[in-house]
Image (tube, grey):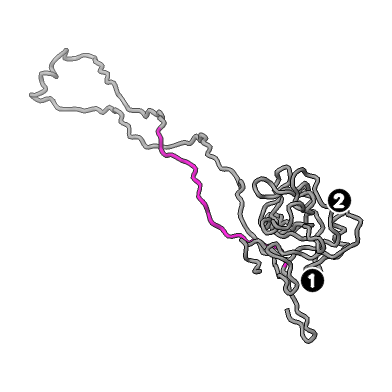
Amino acid sequence: MDPTEQNDVFVGVGFPSNRRPSAGASSEGTTMTEIGTRYFADWAGHTLYHTSGEKIGHVEELWTDDEQGHPTWLTVRTGLFGTHDSLVPVQGVRPRDDGDLETTYPKDLIKDAPRVTPDPTAQGRHIDESEEQRLYRHYQVPQQAEPARETTGRDISGPTTDDAMTRSEERLRVGTEQRERGRARLRKYVVTETEQVQVPVTREEVRVEREAITDANRGQAMDGPAISEEEHEVVLREERPVVETEAVPVERVRLAKEEVQDTETVAGEVRKEHIEADTGRERRA
């Protein structure tokens, strides 16, 4: 099967279990072991939650026991970009009412599970017993006292085949999330400045004007005593600047947001499977 099919859910041969875990689960209700393999294909792409409601990751693969055909491990893809695969025991996992799955194992325990590297020379991507023992000890899963036996991985999308194997690879799933990068606010404050304005002003000044006696002004000149002392007073006026202020609106200011499109580069490690054919005469990738 092309690993790009089934809505980018990568399915392949299952992770083996050299020793079948105990059947059943500590949670009440129907367990995956009791449901059976007829629902294997439906689990691909479903989300696994903790019983508290915390999201753990997406189910990618289900691995079954060689001899009994019972499901033993789930491969769950976790991490911010879905780049971390962890094995979760089927024991303690059950379906939810909404079709997804839930487990009694907490998210941190699953993310810290030992990373297991399948044996590429073994048919069905087997792991050795020592690596599986590490997983059992990590999850504290009790083991039955029975002889060790090999488990063949089962492809979620179909039955086990002996004449072909599926090559899978990890791909980066990159998304975005919004977060607060800062805050902006408008603040108004008062600043006192000094302004200079040129103001035109007027004032009155005196000058002495003399005019000769003529027939036109002779009457006014002869009015009064011929010789006397006299004093005249003239009021002089002037303009002075008067300063006062008034508040007038000059503009309106507001904050507006705009989106700026940038491009950032992210990187992550991905794993790819390679298949080699050894015919005894040549080796090719």
In the image: residue 208, left or right of residue 177: left
Whether residue 207 is in magenta: the answer is no
- Asked which secondary structure carries label 1, the reply is loop
Tell me which label, 2 or 1, sits earlier in the chain: 1
Question: Vertically, is 60 above or below 205?
Answer: below
Q: Residue type at mark 1?
A: Gln
In the image: residue 254, left or right of residue 168: left
Residue drawn at (77%, 57%) of the image? 71
| Location of residue 89 in the rendering, given as x and y in whole percent from the top left corner | 79, 54
Residue behind mark 1: 123
Residue behind mark 2: 140
Question: Vertically, is 105 above or below 204?
Answer: below
- The stretch of residues the image draws in magenta is 248-271
- Give the distance between the C-alpha atoms of the residues marked 2 and 1, in whole angstroms: 28 Å
- Asked which secondary structure carries label 2, the reply is loop
Residue 284, quarter of picture: bottom right
Q: Residue type at mark 2?
A: Gln
